[in-house]
Image (cartoon, helix red, strand yellow):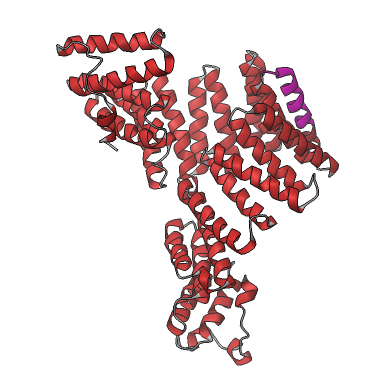
Amino acid sequence: MRGLLKRTLSPNLLNRTPDKLSIDNPDLGPFLLKLARDAIDNPKKALDYAIRAAESFEKCQGPGLEQAMSLRVVAAVYASLGRFQEAIPVMERSIEMLDVENGSDHALAKFSGYMQLGDTCLMIGQMDRSIWCYESGLRIQIEILGDSDPCIAETCRCLAEAHIQAMQFDAAERLCKTILDIHKENSAPGSLQEAADRRLMAIALEAKGDYESALEHLVLASMAMIANSQENEIAAIGISIGHIYASLCQFDEAVFSYQKALTVFKSTKGEDHPSVASVFICLAELYCKTGKLRESKAYCENALRIYSSPTPGTTCEEISGGITEISVIYEALNETEEALRLLRKAVELLEDNPAHRSTIAGIEAQMGVMFYVVGRFSEARTSFESAIGKLRATGESKSAFFGILLNQMGLTCVQLYKVDEAAAVFEEARRLLEEECGTCHVDTLGVYSNLAATYDAMGRYGDAIEILEYILKMREEKLGTANPDVNDEKSRLAELLKEAGRTQNRNGKKLESFFDSEL
């Protein structure tokens, strides 16, 4: 792309400083853009040059390809400085001034702009926006290259990874299938890239519970790595295979896979490498699941020993992620205080910067649940509030996870006798889950039930009765009239009707219209 935009600069111009050139000089923009790219290791200077280049291009040529490229450099520098909220509108502006009808240069620049914007949104946790950008870029790329070019597979890979992070596994699976079809058409079987994409497919399939299909893709990926003598990659795939075996309750096979990977990592990376710690965590989780608690705790301690003295090059994200996983095991071992201590350490390691806010919010939500379970409701509320605030700030307040988090926050408010606040939170959770999951989903019905109980406590008996009637209708349709859960809902509704001085009317007002009016 850059090669398409190069211009020959006058030898006299190269010997002059940009400060001595007029902004009306048509050579100033290309000169400043070159200086900006050359100064990329000095962000402050690069930013100044790139902004001035964009201003010069706008003055001399008007909005177009070269100004868009200057703005892309500005956005890249902002992002490198962690100033993502400034980078995003600059990148959006650079995309808007390009028109695919103006030729392949504009189309390719617009494609790469969408991909850069998608990457930036992904870094600050704006998953939906990132996916939209990748999809927009993919559409342009397909128009230019067709739908079977190997470059299409690269873009589909970015999009599939984003869908997996957003827990949209059906979409990820479809994209992975497209990628594998492109491999089949363009390359020999068993390539390293095909193996990597089969691993991506396995992640999506495992998340959907299709363990047998996931295992098949992992075995094929492992065979490709063996053929190419990729020892560490074989071990990494072995860990994934161990996960599948554990999910299938084939525990001996899982242990064998983990131990085999552990041996490889110890010999190739060293005894104190984070990869070794990650296998220790896998073994600890497996032994916890099978009731071998002493062995489980021993492996946790071994992993923590490695994370306490990390090898050079280990990132804070790696350590924080490992510690978070260990905290889940300690919680299962009924060592809640140790689990909470580890989660606080995980948050400290990440620090509060935009790139980590989404991850920190997840950890704080986990802490909130732990506080709630042990009856420390004020601390639970503080953790949930912090997590909710971070997710709103990163634009992740339109997901099913956010709705579930709001529901948990509402339950905490009830425990603290903040009933009005609980009702407001439950109502937001209801609207969100209706939109994301539908009115019949189990999570949505759970929020309905909590909201009905809250309305009951507030004396809003009519609203509570309408909700309970709808829940009972849904449960009868899903579970049958003889199910114990249905009987419980009937008893609950009958009691509330009695308190309200009414009798149950099975042919009364339907609740569907009530909920539709709230959307």
* Residue drawn at 64 percent across, 59 percent down: 146
**Residue 298 x %, y %:** 66, 21
Q: Quadrant of the C terminus?
A: top left
Residue 253 drawn in magenta? yes
User: Which residue is situated farthest in the left direction here?
Assistant: 501
Disc tally is 0
104 up-or-down from 199: above or below: below
Residue 458 drawn in magenta? no
The answer to whether residue 416 shows anywhere in this view is no
Place residue 2 in its image quadrant. bottom right
The answer to whether residue 364 shows anywhere in this view is yes
Q: Quadrant of the N terminus?
A: bottom right
368 up-or-down from 160: above or below: above
480 up-or-down from 276: above or below: above
**Residue 32 x %, y %:** 53, 79
Place residue 180 in its image quadrant. top right
* Residue drawn at 71 percent across, 38 percent down: 273
Magenta region:
249-263
